[in-house]
Image (cartoon, grey):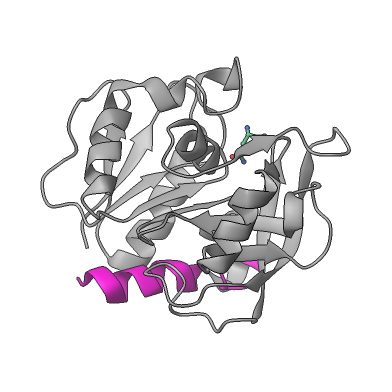
């Protein structure tokens, strides 16, 4: 599977994601600079990395969401291309309007960096098919703006349409309804605050994150 990882000014977890994708797919991703206006031909996944973008000025993800490459990403997502946003990437995807809601400052106003136990909600998307619904997995978090907010109507819709991919098993950042990751209506866009790319080999303490990339590979094909 050919993949693309976006790179913004100040991105600092793009290489983590690239290494994880290469380990699982066997092919190094194309690293796509934010100023590009088109995605490389034939990519089966666009990954928006975690870390920071543009120093997180204004709001996390707000400036990155308006960079030239994001127009191409929104267009491709609308046509069904899988798009994964991890942490800062999730923030970018909400700011770009590909996912509903917003990621606000953590409820305790502190940076949270630790392993988080998640429960899998939707286990039938391209991203989550290698998990079982209700399964508990461990994936690390590292953020100060992970406090997911959406109004009740949006939250009810996300739950009613089985679009909550992951929830925190305990309180991590104050997210409404403990939401850690959500899907778009079509199921081809996933945003999640935990970092699956930091849990892909035994040396990371487990491989629960790797399964997400393996599920994608099964869906998209080599
Ligand atoms: N690990 C990350 O992607 C962090 C995202 C963002 N900089 C935050 O702290 O919320």
Quadrant of the image occupied by residue 25: bottom left
Q: Work out whether 70 lies above or below 222.
A: above
Q: Work out whether 31 lies above or below 154.
A: above
Q: Quadrant of the N terminus?
A: bottom left
Badge count: 0
Write down which quadrant ligand 1 falls in: top right
**Could you tell me residue 217's position as x and y percent?**
30, 70
Q: In this view, does 166 lie to the left or right of 126?
A: right
Q: Residue at x 12, y 52 (%)?
A: 42
**Could you tell me residue 222's position as x and y percent?**
19, 71
Residues shaded magenta: 204-222
Q: Which residue is drawn at 19% across and 52% down?
A: 43
Q: Work out whether 172 lies above or below 213.
A: above
Q: Can residue 193 be seen in this view?
A: no
**Could you tell me residue 66's position as x and y percent?**
39, 21
**Could you tell me residue 4's position as x and y percent?**
28, 46
Q: Is residue 70 left or right of residue 16?
A: left
Tell me if residue 205 is in the magenta stretch: yes
Q: Which of 184 and 2 is in front in this view?
A: 184
Q: Which residue is drawn at 61% across and 65% down?
A: 166
Prevailing SS of the magenta stretch: helix
Q: Residue at x 41, y 71 (%)?
A: 125
Name, please, the residue furthest toward the front: 153
Q: Nearer the viewer, residue 205 or 92?
A: 92
Tell me if residue 78 is in the magenta stretch: no
Q: Can residue 190 be seen in this view?
A: yes
């Amino acid at each position: 599977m050919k993949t693309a990882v976006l790179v913004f000014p100040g991105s600092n977890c793009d290489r983590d994601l690239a290494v994880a994708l290469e380990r699982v797919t066997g092919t190094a991703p194309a690293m796509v600079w934010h100023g590009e206006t088109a995605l490389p031909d034939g990519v089966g996944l666009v990954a928006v990395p975690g870390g920071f973008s543009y120093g997180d000025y204004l709001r996390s993800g707000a400036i990155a969401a308006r960079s030239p490459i994001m127009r191409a990403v929104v267009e491709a997502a609308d046509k069904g291309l899988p798009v994964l946003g991890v942490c800062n990437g999730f923030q970018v995807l909400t700011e770009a309007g590909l996912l509903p809601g917003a990621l606000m400052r953590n409820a305790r106003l502190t940076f949270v960096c630790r392993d988080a136990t998640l429960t899998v909600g939707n286990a039938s998307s391209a991203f989550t098919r290698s998990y079982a619904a209700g399964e508990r997995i461990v994936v690390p978090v590292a953020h100060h703006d992970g406090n997911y907010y959406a109004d009740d109507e949006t939250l009810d819709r996300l739950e009613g349409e089985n679009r909550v991919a992951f929830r925190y098993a305990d309180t991590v950042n104050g997210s409404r309804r403990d939401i850690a990751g959500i899907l778009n209506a079509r199921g081809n866009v996933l945003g999640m605050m935990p970092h699956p790319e930091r849990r892909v080999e035994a040396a990371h303490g487990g491989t629960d994150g790797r399964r997400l990339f393996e599920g994608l590979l099964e869906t998209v094909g080599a």
